Image (cartoon, rainbow, N blue to C red):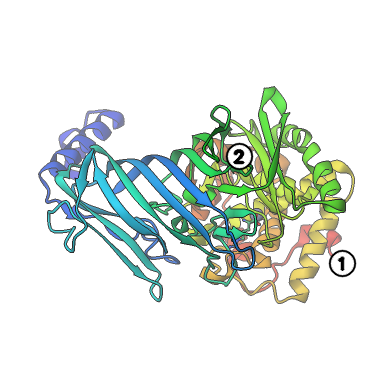
Amino acid sequence: SVLALTAFGTGSAAALGTHASTARANSAASAAYTVGAPGSGDPYFPYDGNGGYDVLHYDLALRYAPPTDPAALVGKLSGIATITLRAKQNLQSLNFDLRGLDVTSVRVDGKAAAHGKSPGNGSAEWSQKQDDANRFWELTVGLLPKLREGKSTTIIIEYGGNTGRPLDTTGALYGWVTTADGAMVVNEPDGASTWYPVNDDPQDKATYSFHITVPEGKTAVANGLADGRPRTKAGWTTWSWEATDPMSSYLATATVGDFTLANDKGPHGLPIVNAIDAGVTGPALAETKASLALQPQMIAFLEGTFGRYPFESFGAIVDDDSVDYALETQTRPVYSQVADEATVVHELGHQWFGDSVTPSDWKDIWLNEGWATYIEWLWAEHQGTATIPAQFADAVSYLDANDGWTLNIADPGRDELFAAPVYLRGAAALHALRTEVGDKAFFAGARLWLNRYKNSTATTADFEAVMEKTSGRSLTTFFDEWLRQGVRPATPQLQAELP
Ligand code: ARG
Ligand code: ZN
């Protein structure tokens, strides 16, 4: 590009850009065809995601039989995944992440591939390798003809097996969690591969179609909007859902249970679909219904602060207590046992902060949890239940009392992704930032962040740059102290709020 600059010194920047990318495409076209990497480079999860391609759309036709023995918690899942993708480099093979399920057939652009040993050597074979110790769960698909950079292909993978109760690296249940009445499906951070072949990289957003076939009487709920009425044939019912907003794989769900669906409407006619499991009863059910009834008001409040709700629909899936946390699955968060008001506004806040604008790498997780926690504070203040200074002071007290300042929340480590300081120090940092730069620059920064990176991913450095832009200040020292240093920052302007 230095040469290009000399040669086209009188051209506009835009013309240079066009020329440079044409040159790049031309040289890539003649470049060798290589294997797609088995990982996409996240430092915490080296074999998650894959290299060399970008998924455009997943069509997942799943058939699921919940456990017959409620004590054993083993279900049967089979699927046909139709994956449309575009090559980002010249590819002779590519990988998908798939964990604990067996592939039975692969077709590439309609042509059957054979199960074989050397998919990477210019053959059309496919093979599977599962290595739990190294967290290496890969399906490799050879491509013949080879796939040229920029070209799209459709790969159809049939697979299946028994489902169980997968654990993340911290020992928490996630992924396709088999429950007595179905499955509770919550993927964060890397549980998607427990139920479909996936490029499990938050940076590779795609649209999804779901067709989930379950025994008649069961309900399957996924992201987006229902595509027609469920269809029943010979004792099996198929539930179809379409998610047309680009989505990271950790935000997909296809939860199955004894759900009752209820429709509601948010601002501007936004469709809201809520699903509550029959296992949610008594006071938990009453509290859940009261919180879910507030969703339209919560959306209106957050739209006033952060701009338009980013997706086509919203709602909740409230399952039993199989998993002890909630997740901001896109358009339709999943809750365990009860949806309390603070958690509902937290998961709603994630639709802007996390789902629309997603961390580029897992180490940037505070951008999700700090904002969602701060949104809980904003809502509580709006409702008149607690002021922001009081909630900030509580968070600081908690962090003081629990050694909470030693964790660098801008790179907390793989097994501290969801540690309390990621949430509380994150929210405290945002409030300190607001105090430092003023409301105008702070909220303008939030909106610039949401607009600039909508349906995309971004890093902590990107966030710092946005806030420096709207405040006109250098914030290097500020962010270093509030996110990274191992001690509580000096907070002259916040002293009055501290205990
Ligand atoms: N992001 C979720 C939340 O909103 C937490 C997910 C926890 N995941 C886990 N595997 N422990 O708080
Ligand atoms: Zn959260």
Residue 499 numbered mark, or none: 1
Cβ at disc 2 under 8 Å from ligand 1: no
Horizontally, is 90 left or right of 304 in the view? left
Residue nearest the viewer, comparing 64 with 463:
64
Q: Is residue 173 visible?
A: yes
Residue 383 x, y percent position in the rendering: 86, 42
Q: Amino acid at mark 2?
A: Thr
Q: Amino acid at mark 1?
A: Pro
Sequence-wise, the earlier of marks 1 and 2 is: 2
Q: Nearer the viewer, residue 424 or 73?
A: 73
Q: Position of residue 384 (x, y in %)?
A: 89, 44
383 relative to 418 in the view: left or right = right
Query: Which of the 4 image quadrants contains residue 47?
Result: bottom left
At mark 1, the secondary structure is loop
Q: Where, quadrant-wise, is the N terminus in this rendering?
A: top left
Along the viewing direction, whichever of 400 and 183 lies nearer the viewer? 183
On the question of residue 40 being in view, the answer is no
Q: Is residue 52 left or right of residue 356?
A: left
Task: Farthest residue to the right: give it.
Answer: 384
Above or below — where is 242 with respect to 72?
Answer: above
Which image quadrant shows ligand 1? bottom right
In this figure, which residue is indicated by the disc labeled 2?
Answer: 331
* Crowdedness near tag 1: few (<14), some (14–19) or many (≥20) residues, C-alpha within 10 Å: few
At x 73% / y 45%, what residue is drawn? 345
The percent position of residue 488, horizontal first and vertical second, equals 70, 70
Select label 1 or label 2 by which is in front: 2
Mark 1, ligand 2, within 8 Å: the answer is no
Give me the residue at 34% from left, 60% from top.
39
Q: Is 242 placed above or below 372 here?
A: above
Q: Position of residue 54 (x, y in %)?
A: 34, 44
State the mark number for residue 144: none
Question: Residue at coordinates 26% horizontally, 39% vertically from top-left?
Answer: 153
